[in-house]
Amino acid sequence: MTEPRYTAQEMMTVLAARLVSNDDVCFVGIGAPSAACNLARLTHAPDITLVYESGTLDAHPRTLPLSIGDGELCETALTTCSVPEMFRYWLQGGHMTVGFLGTAQIDRHANLNTTVVGPYNKPTARLPGAGGASEAGVQCGQIFIIAKQSRRSFVAELDFLTTYGHGTGHDARQRLGIRTKGPTQVITDLCHLQPDAVTKELKVVSLHPGVTRDQVVDATAWSLQFADEVGETAAPTDEELQVLRELKARGEV
């Protein structure tokens, strides 16, 4: 059997990168969101503005940062501001077109948990916490979410609500006075999901090459919806794979 040209992780990262544009100002999370945004910067979106919550504005990292405090971000940024300025002016001032977040748990309405797994007072696992994700969820123009898909991560009910997505669905955001779009794209290692225009419940709009509907259903703890027309995600190009692998290799060195 022929070995695939790319991994499921690479497919997920490439698709996520394709969704941001040259004109975006992205509030970037560490890990998969950072990999996707930097792949976009090094391919189709050279003028994208990447902002990390540590206060680094217009960062151009040569390697993927290990944390928001990685010196690579400060050294390659246009400028660095204080964390209070980052949150009070840049993020909460509505200057971010996209917030690109990872998550440990997500529900059918794209609400996120990055705080604890299990009961809050006696959790089975303590997670990194909100960082700037709570503010990003309501202050960025829209939210893109990238996460590996399994029944542990795509849950029927969150153990803790860290980042507000579409709440209980429908017009929940508007009823709270939130004026931004919220989650508009969810990218996993199996498929691409978007919220329904009316109910705001996530539905599959494309399957990655070789992935079946049954695989996606089995990896989701709620009754997953599919769009009327479900496409196949375009496979990564040779250029996308080369740039992504070189980016990761520089970090390993």
Image: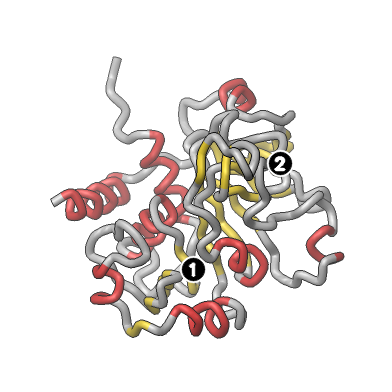
Location of mark 1 (residue): 27
Question: Could you say where residue 201 lies in the image, as x and y percent from the top left?
Answer: 75, 44
What is the basis of the colouring in this image? Answer: secondary structure
Question: Could you say where residue 216 lies in the image, as x and y percent from the top left?
Answer: 59, 28
Looking at the image, which is closer to me, 54 or 233?
54
Residue 119, image quadrant:
top right
Mark 1 and mark 2: Cα distance apart in space: 23 Å
Residue 2, image quadrant:
top left
Question: Could you say where residue 225 lies in the image, as x and y percent from the top left?
Answer: 73, 34
Location of mark 2 (residue): 108
Specify whether 234 is left or right of 226. Answer: left
User: In the displayed structure, would residue 235 be above or below residue 145?
Assistant: above
Crowd class of label 2 (few under 14; some 14 to 19; many from 20; radius 10 Å): many
Crowd class of label 1 (few under 14; some 14 to 19; many from 20; radius 10 Å): many
- Residue type of the residue flagged with mark 2: Arg
Task: Residue at 81% x, 71% y: name it.
Answer: 177
Specify whether 172 is left or right of 18. Answer: right
Q: Quadrant of the N terminus?
A: top left
Q: Secondary structure at mark 1?
A: strand
Q: Secondary structure at mark 2?
A: loop
Q: Residue furthest left?
A: 253
